[in-house]
Image (cartoon, rainbow, N blue to C red):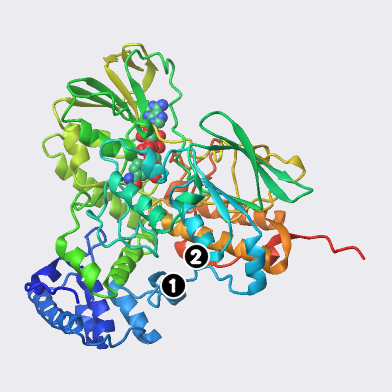
Amino acid sequence: MAEIPADLETVLKDAHLPALMTALVHMTGDTHWLRSEWTPVYNPLSRGDPGIPEEEQAKIRAEAAKAIRAYLEGKPMAMPNPPIDVLRRQMDFVAGAEIPEQYVDFLTDELVLKGRSSKDPHFEAPPVQAAARKMKVLIVGAGMSGLLTGIRLSQAGVPFEIVDKNADVGGTWFENTYPGCRVDNSNHMYSYSFEPNHAWPQHFSPQPVLLEYFRGIAKKHDLKKHIRFETLVEQLAWDEAKEVWRATLKGKDGKTEVVEATAVVTAVGQLNRPRMPDIEGLGTFEGPAFHSAEWRHDVDLKGKRVVVIGTGASAYQFVPEIAPEVAKLTVFQRNPPWGLPVPHYHEDVPDGMKWTLEHVPFYDKWYRFWLFWMTTEGFLPMVKTDPSWNGSPDAVSPANAMLRDMATESYRMQLAERPDLLPKVTPNYPIGGKRAVLDNGVWLAALKRDNVELVTEKVARITPKGVVTADGREYEADVLIYGTGFQASNFLSFLKVKGRGGRDLHESWGGDARAYLGITHPGFPNFFTIYGPNTNIVVNGSIIFFSECAVRYIVGCLHLLAETGARALEPRQDVYDDFNRKVDEANAGWAWGSPNVSSWYKNSFGRVSQNWPFGLIDYWRATLAPNPDDFVLERAPEPVG
Ligand code: NAP
């Protein structure tokens, strides 16, 4: 039995009260926890304060403590599986708003109250199992999505091998080790739905913690024996006669090997190839120069003159970390990021919250549900373009303008003694146009330091001594750091893929990568991409959700092959074309599609090639299971005679 803290009421002060009250419905079977006068009223930028008067909150906690104590002392759980009307009331209550009917099945699935999820593979039928055992899937990448694919294929009984260029698992969390690197999505949501971590040390934990989580997952699911590290998949070629992929792998020693696979899943993320800026003189700098994703820990920045180019999500995290130790820091900014006030960005998860997550059944699920709703579908309307909006171009709707005003006010307050910085750091594009960053004050505090200078003049060239701006001024430096992002729209640039009839994937894309649901590609049988074209999210939630949906769909495609005896499948061209037309139309309706925004979400054609333009619910529904009518299925030839 769990030890019950003597000061349980105090411990519960750290819990998210509406999630706790919702969990108590299961424990007590009593719905009075959801009474209307206790319905939370959240401020969109608050950290979940329910807006209930403090004395009332104290009464609720006292009652909750009694119920939890009774349960932990042996009283049975009264309502582990609430009827649908109660479940709906629970959802509305914790969200503080009525959840629309069309979301109920989706959110019920996300809650996983009964321990079953639509994302669990079902390969129970013996003929399906037998066919699955004969497959071999090659997974490219051992990061978040690759490990997930391995776990699901293990559960399905499909043999697989994972190949990764790095020396360990973790992908982006292995590669990005710059100071201050941390997840900018709430950790209790940025974790696999089936592998919650009640011990996250912070709401937004630092990179080493994330890397440990993924290492722990690989160990728990015994994945390492399936992984070849320090190996690059250089080429994939579809063998028409054998109907298999032939993959050329190159090891650390430079030797190549060809392996065969029934299907290939690329799980390489969108942000894994650093982008160096197109600036004259790049490479001429005499001192150490490196990209944020290839941080040189051997370069001591103490007392040095450091130049940083870029002010995106990465620089936003490392600039405040290095500013106090360097002699002089010059930050070159092309466009400033929008910061959304999140005061607890660097705070520890309080012990009481950890205790509640671990010991109060269903609390973790409802807390995650609340985060999920508030930061995903619940937030999306704030960045939706209102076609009738005729206000300034730094907003796309009245709600978006309200958010801009809140964020601007927060900047103004932080810069009370440095009003000269305000116009420099205030973006002229709408919130949601680019990835917003989480503002707890450290960014502007760094820019206000005496040893830090924010330069908005265009960088004209790099010289052996430093950087020269368009106005001819030279900034001498000892170290140059590029926070200039990734070659995101250059999907799979490292990989040559030859499909049916020798068709080349990159040639068929012509620099404008597309896919059906981000996952399948006409002419490329049994070839699946996770976090592929048009599956990135800007403001709404955790990319792990997208990977879980994509993997469910891919596993569904393998099930379809096993079930039908087909050798290969690929999407119909018309289905693919129709899907992509809808994606392009829809992307125009969001802040990131606004014509006055340039970002890594748009490719060289100006098309938004990265982002998913619908709700999470739409991706969840579209990827529930493959629709056989969307595909061309290649059947094995009938035996002769
Ligand atoms: P980024 O957001 O693409 O930022 C690149 C920065 O470099 C921008 O400020 C860009 O300016 C600037 N830049 C590029 N070329 C330049 C040039 N020639 N001269 C001057 N400035 C130039 O890259 P990132 O910061 O690495 O982040 C990429 C993505 O990674 C993020 O959007 C996010 O999705 C993800 N990320 C997540 C986390 C997290 O979860 N913790 C942390 C870091 C990154 P413009 O804005 O004018 O293009």
Residue tagged by mark 1? 109
Residue tagged by mark 2? 620
In this rendered view, identify the residue nearer to me: 589 or 253: 253
The crowding category of the residue bearing disc 1, from other C-alpha atoms within 10 Å (few below 14, some 14 to 19, many at least 20), is some
Taking the spot 42% from the left edge, 56% from the top edge, the residue there is: 544
Q: Quadrant of residue 112?
A: bottom left
- Cβ of mark 2 under 8 Å from ligand 1: the answer is no
Q: On the rendered structure, is 44 left or right of 350?
A: right
Amino acid of disc 2:
Trp
Q: Is residue 429 visible?
A: no
Q: Secondary structure at mark 1?
A: helix
Q: On the rendered structure, is 591 left or right of 66?
A: right
At which x and y percent is residue 124? 58, 73
Taking the image in four quarters, ligand 1 sits in the one at top left
In this rendered view, identify the residue nearer to me: 441 or 164: 164
With respect to residue 578, does 486 lie above or below?
above
With respect to residue 32, does 187 lie above or below?
above
Q: Is residue 390 visible?
A: yes
- Cβ of mark 1 under 8 Å from ligand 1: the answer is no
Taking the spot 35% from the left edge, 85% from the top edge, the residue there is: 82
Amino acid of disc 1:
Asp
Q: On the rendered structure, is 52 left or right of 298?
A: left
Q: Quadrant of residue 249?
A: top right
Q: Point out the image quarter for the N terminus.
A: bottom left
